[in-house]
Amino acid sequence: DTGVSQDPRHKITKRGQNVTFRCDPISEHNRLYWYRQTLGQGPEFLTYFQNEAQLEKSRLLSDRFSAERPKGSFSTLEIQRTEQGDSAMYLCASSLETGRNYGYTFGSGTRLTVV
Amino acid sequence: AQTVTQSQPEMSVQEAETVTLSCTYDTSESDYYLFWYKQPPSRQMILVIRQEAYKQQNATENRFSVNFQKAAKSFSLKISDSQLGDAAMYFCAYRSRTSGTYKYIFGTGTRLKVLA
């Protein structure tokens, strides 16, 4: 297993366009998380899945954002009608929390620039 | 709501010396986890060390150790024998153990520079 993979690594888009990011978690991990990180800040929680169920969403996740995790495997995060304020690093993480095994494994992120 | 504060935006340490990064948090919960994550310039965050709040013993991982003061809500990270590869952003994070959420709350980070 090569860890958590995110694609693309970088995305430049024009304001108003839609973008979609993909995250492939570690295969045996049942939980998957999306975070957003802006320059000089720590990651902020967006949403998380347990298997295919989306169990929690942040208020940061406006109606322009949607996330899916079909079949409990990879996940996609779509942003519709992008705005300049959406420019950030979008981080995906996964975990399998059993007993003493807890903590996230992060991907390398997708850097979004809205111009 | 829980908050995590890292009051040192940037720290420097000489190679082979010891440095301590500070983190304080606010919570009304009694059972939770605390973490330190490292984010090198390549941007992938890596777990450095974790602490369970119900444990009084401070966690250690090789050159990394924490000073967990539950009453003071303080969770500092000590890096001994600093190496050039330790240069990175370090984030402190909190996760509830009882509220049914698995989300982390991160601080704003401390940039650590290691001087040769």
Image: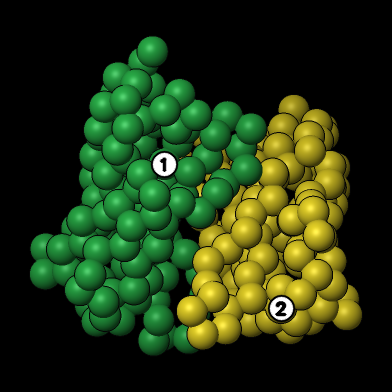
Chain colours: A yellow, B green
Q: Are marks 2 and 1 on the same chain?
A: no
- Residue B93 x/y as whole percent: 40, 58
Q: Quadrant of the C terminus of chain A?
A: top right
Q: Is residue A110 left or right of residue A20?
A: left
Q: Which of the 4 image quarters holds residue B18?
A: top left
Residue under the point 21% across and 61% down = B68
Disc 1 marks a residue whose amino acid type is: Tyr
Q: Do tag 2 and tag 1 residues touch (Cβ < 8 Å)?
A: no
In this rendered view, identify the residue nearer to me: B33 or B60.
B60
The picture quadrant where one finds residue B97 is bottom left
Q: Is residue B10 visible?
A: no
Marked residue chain, label 2:
A
Image spot of residue A64 (x, y percent): 73, 59
The amino acid pointed to by label 2 is: Asn
Q: Nearer the viewer, residue B3 or B114?
A: B114
Task: Determine whether B8 is above or below B12 in the image.
Answer: below
Which residue is identified by label 2? A30
Q: Which residue is mark 1?
A: B90
Q: Secondary structure at mark 2?
A: loop
For the residues labelled 2 and 1, the Cα–Cα distance comes to 26 Å
Q: Residue furthest right?
A: A71
Would you call the spot at circle 1 few (<14 residues within 10 Å), some (14-19), or many (20 or more)?
A: many
